[in-house]
Every structure is written in structure tokens, then in C-alpha cells.
């Protein structure tokens, strides 16, 4: 089934990001260490393998095992196993990724984490080539897609007034968390076209989702419209795998002309398991429904520690001004304004005004995303920014691997680090031609004064 192979590909991306980034983020010496988290949060609130044992080596084994299982599913190994074996194989990445998300703290507090887990759990119930996809599971997949789109549409209409005035895209492409290589061009589209984009978005998210439950070919047309909309969003920004998993969710609703292969009747135990679990999920579904109907609707929240049923939504409000935190270091013993401050370059977030954004999605650059939140308010950075600065002052190699470029070698880190807040805006067509820069930035204020290691950690 195309849906399952595509989902396995997204699992692979998610586990790869975990394997390559965890040491600096949540490792034993990470900015938000897992051992410290599991000491204060009980297993029942965040079920995870790492409550029983944690070491960086064990986490790496789990993450790379997740990559291996995802690659096997992508290659279709589940179709070579008996039905129960295929289901267990699909259960493995769900359990492993649940263990990661439930100890990931703020680094994993994104809606697409829960969405991957909710959809991944439903994939277990689809079985393999030995049985036809159960109708009730296909319905549940459409139900998840409905909640993703309709919930996002409602949060927009209840949130920022610019969505109702059709003006949000005058700002969104410039202020979104991580622009892509085409975002500058999307921002420079004529404003009347931006109005059409917003209006089309409202239709796709508030009206089209109901058509998913209509007979064919209406349901196929509805799903296809959603796929086209998501591909438009893929081109306009870097939203990790949010857009891609929404596309994957829409695939089962599209009816492709073909002769269905003959399959034997499903075994009784399988029918019982599918119906029992589906009934449980439908029963839990009242929570996101109540949330969508509430005037105090929240977005991107899980209603159970297993992330079986969740609520989704994105960009209920849109920033009008883009701020960026620029991190700099100096080797001078006594820092001054005219010291040789050198800037750290991040992989995805804007930095050097002349550096054009790159496409990273569906891969998720977690530190870059959190730096965007830090620029919105220092409160978002409180739990981890101090640890980031400390690791840079130490020349921590795992942390430096999260960056595009460090101006200091790991064995000769800076003596002081400072952070400054800048306002960024896209250049105009004329400025782009004259300077070659896609951004123009203006200093706003100090974010963190010059800081150095103190006490026993201080370098001589």
C-alpha cells in the first residue's frame, strides 16, 4: 500500500533526525538531559523505554534501530511476514518513537510528532498484503485528516484577525519559523494573489474536509485538493514533515483505477483486534471534537500519554515582524563593543543576510526552530539557552554539529559569547539586484550580555 510505504519514509526521516541530534539536545550532557527529566516525571505521564534505562549509547541504539525498521518497512518487509508479524513490525517504530517523543521535552513539542504517532498507530491495524485494508481503519485515517485540516481552519478563524481579513500572507512568508528557498518569491507575490491564497486556504480547511466522507469520486477530489494545497506549502517554507504527513494521510482517500487483488477473508482474531481498538479510538475522539467546538480551542495537544488521539492546528496567529537571535563569540579576554565578535551560523534559520535559505523539510532542524521561538520571547529560551551558550563556550562537538559553521574550532572555543536581537525583513527586488542579499537586518537590542564560563569550568 502506497500509504504505508510513504509513512515508513517519514518514520525514517524522524528517526534519522533523532539519531543525529539527540546528544546535544537531550543526551546525558545535553541542554535538557533525559536523565534529569525522568527523575521528576513519572512513567505513567510519559511512557518511554528510557524510564527504565538511559544512556547515550542506548538511545543511539534505539534511534538507529528505528531507522533500520523504518527502512525495512519502506522496502516492504512486512508483506513478506505473516499477518501478526507484519503488525508487530509496524508496532516497533511506533513504540520506539513514542519513547523518544515522551522524553524529548520542548524539542519535541510540535504537533507533527503526535500526528506521526497517531497515524503510525493506525498503520499497525492496516495489517499487510494478507488482508484487505479494514474499512473502519480507512475511515479513521480520514477522520484524522479531517481533524488536521478542520482544526487548523478553525484556529485561524478564531485567532488572528488577518485570517478573516485575508491579509495574513502579507506577513507569513517573511515571518514563518524557517523560510525555504522560494519563500522570498512567495512573499513578493502581488497582494491580491495573497488574498486569493488565504481564501482558498479557508475553503480547503473549512469546507473540503467534510467531502472526505462523501461517495467517490467526490472524496478523491477533496483529498486531491488537500494534496495540492500541501504541496504549495511545501514550496513556500520548511515545516518539517507536517505537510508531507498530511499528503500521506490524503492518499488512502484517493481512489486509483485498478482491479483490487483477491485476498482471503481476514482471520477472526484480526477482525476482533481491529474492531476493539477502533472502538476505543472512536470513543477517545470526543476530546478533540469538544476542543474544536470550544471557543477556547487549543492546538497541537495530545489527550493521552500514548498520543493515540490529538488535536492539531498551525498558525492561529501570524507575526508581523521577524526577529532573530544572532549568537556571537570573541576570543578577547575583556570583551568590548569593538572586540572581534564572530557570528555562529545556523543551518536553517536566517543569519547572514546574503545567505539564501535552503530546503530542509521533511527533515527537522530542532535547534533552529527553537531559536525562532526564542526570538519571539526570551521565556521560550529559558530552559535551554543558557546551556547552549555553555556548550559553545566549551567547544562541545555535539552542539557544534547542529550548526552550519562555527567561527571557532572545537579545541579553541571563544572566551565570551553574546547574543543580540535583530529585526529581519526581506529585501525588495531592487535591493536584491543591488546587494545580492535576500534579507536586511537592523539591530534591536541585547539579548544576552557577554558571558563566559565561571568557576571550575572556566578556561585558563
Image: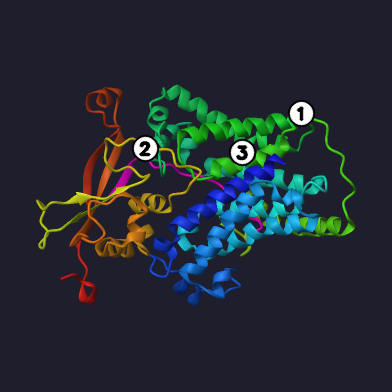
> Badge 3 is on which residue?
247
Magenta run includes residue 322 = yes
Q: Judge left or right: residue 450 versus residue 262.
A: left
- Image quarter of residue 86: bottom right
Q: What is the x, y in percent for residue 289?
A: 67, 51
- Please tell me which of labels 1 and 3 falls first in the chain: 1
| 425 or 292: nearer the viewer | 425
Q: Nearer the viewer, mark 1 or mark 3?
A: 3
> Badge 2 is on which residue?
357
Distance of mark 3 from mark 2, alpha carbons? 24 Å
Distance of mark 1 from mark 3, alpha carbons? 18 Å
Q: Secondary structure at mark 3?
A: helix
The reply to whether callout 1 and callout 3 are in contact (CB within 8 Å) is: no
Magenta stretch? 308-325
> Badge 1 is on which residue?
217
Q: What is the x, y in percent for residue 370?
A: 40, 53
Q: Secondary structure at mark 2?
A: loop
The crowding category of the residue bearing disc 3, from other C-alpha atoms within 10 Å (few below 14, some 14 to 19, many at least 20), is many
Q: What is the x, y in percent for residue 236?
A: 46, 33
Distance of mark 1 from mark 2, alpha carbons? 39 Å
Amino acid at each position: 500500500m502506497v500509504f504505508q510505504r510513504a509513512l515508513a519514509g517519514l518514520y525514517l526521516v524522524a528517526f534519522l533526525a533523532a539519531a543525529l541530534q539527540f546528544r546535544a539536545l537531550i543526551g546525558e550532557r545535553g541542554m535538557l538531559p533525559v536523565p534529569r527529566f525522568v527523575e521528576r516525571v513519572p512513567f505513567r505521564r510519559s511512557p518511554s523505554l528510557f524510564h527504565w534505562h538511559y544512556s547515550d549509547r542506548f538511545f543511539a541504539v534505539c534511534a538507529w534501530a528505528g531507522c533500520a525498521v523504518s527502512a525495512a518497512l519502506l522496502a516492504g518487509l512486512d508483506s513478506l511476514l505473516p499477518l501478526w508479524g507484519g503488525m508487530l513490525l509496524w508496532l516497533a517504530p511506533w513504540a520506539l518513537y513514542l519513547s523518544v517523543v515522551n522524553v524529548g521535552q520542548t524539542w519535541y513539542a510540535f504537533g507533527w510528532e503526535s500526528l506521526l504517532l497517531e497515524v503510525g498507530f493506525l498503520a499497525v491495524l492496516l495489517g499487510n498484503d494478507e488482508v484487505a485494508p479494514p474499512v473502519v481503519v480507512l475511515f479513521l485515517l480520514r477522520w484524522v485528516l479531517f481533524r488536521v485540516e478542520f482544526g487548523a481552519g478553525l484556529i485561524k478563524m478564531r485567532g488572528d484577525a488577518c485570517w478573516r481579513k485575508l491579509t495574513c500572507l502579507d506577513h507569513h512568508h517573511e515571518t514563518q519559523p524557517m523560510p525555504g528557498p522560494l519563500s522570498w518569491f512567495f512573499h513578493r507575490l502581488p497582494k491580491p494573489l495573497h488574498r486569493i491564497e488565504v481564501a482558498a486556504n479557508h475553503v480547503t480547511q473549512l469546507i473540503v474536509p467534510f467531502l472526505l466522507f462523501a461517495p467517490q469520486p467526490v472524496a478523491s477530489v477533496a483529498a486531491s485538493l488537500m494534496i495540492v494545497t500541501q504541496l504549495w506549502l511545501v514550496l513556500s517554507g520548511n515545516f518539517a514533515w507536517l505537510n508531507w504527513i498530511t499528503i500521506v494521510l490524503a492518499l488512502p482517500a484517493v481512489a486509483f483505477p485498478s482491479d483490487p487483488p483477491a485476498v482471503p477473508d481476514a482471520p477472526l482474531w484480526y477482525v476482533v483486534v481491529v474492531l476493539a481498538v477502533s472502538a476505543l479510538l472512536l470513543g477517545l475522539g470526543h476530546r478533540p471534537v469538544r476542543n474544536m467546538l470550544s471557543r477556547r480551542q487549543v492546538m497541537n495537544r495530545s489527550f493521552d500519554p500514548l498520543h493515540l488521539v490529538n488535536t492539531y492546528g498551525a498558525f492561529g496567529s501570524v507575526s508581523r515582524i521577524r526577529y532573530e537571535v544572532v549568537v556571537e563569540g570573541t576570543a578577547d579576554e575583556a570583551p568590548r563593543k569593538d572586540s572581534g565578535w564572530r557570528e555562529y551560523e545556523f543551518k536553517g534559520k536566517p543569519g547572514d543576510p546574503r545567505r539564501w535559505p535552503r530546503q530542509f523539510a521533511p527533515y527537522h532542524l530542532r535547534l533552529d526552530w527553537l531559536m525562532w521561538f526564542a526570538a519571539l520571547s526570551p521565556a521560550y529560551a529559558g530552559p535551554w539557552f543558557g546551556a547552549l551558550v555553555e556548550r559553545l563556550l566549551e567547544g562541545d562537538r555535539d552542539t557544534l554539529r547542529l550548526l552550519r559553521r562555527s567561527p571557532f574550532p572545537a579545541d579553541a572555543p571563544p572566551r565570551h559569547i553574546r547574543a543580540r536581537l535583530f529585526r529581519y525583513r526581506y529585501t525588495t527586488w531592487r535591493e536584491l539586484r543591488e546587494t545580492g542579499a535576500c534579507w536586511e537586518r537592523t539591530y534591536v537590542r541585547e539579548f544576552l550580555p557577554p558571558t563566559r564560563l565561571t568557576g571550575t569550568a572556566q578556561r585558563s
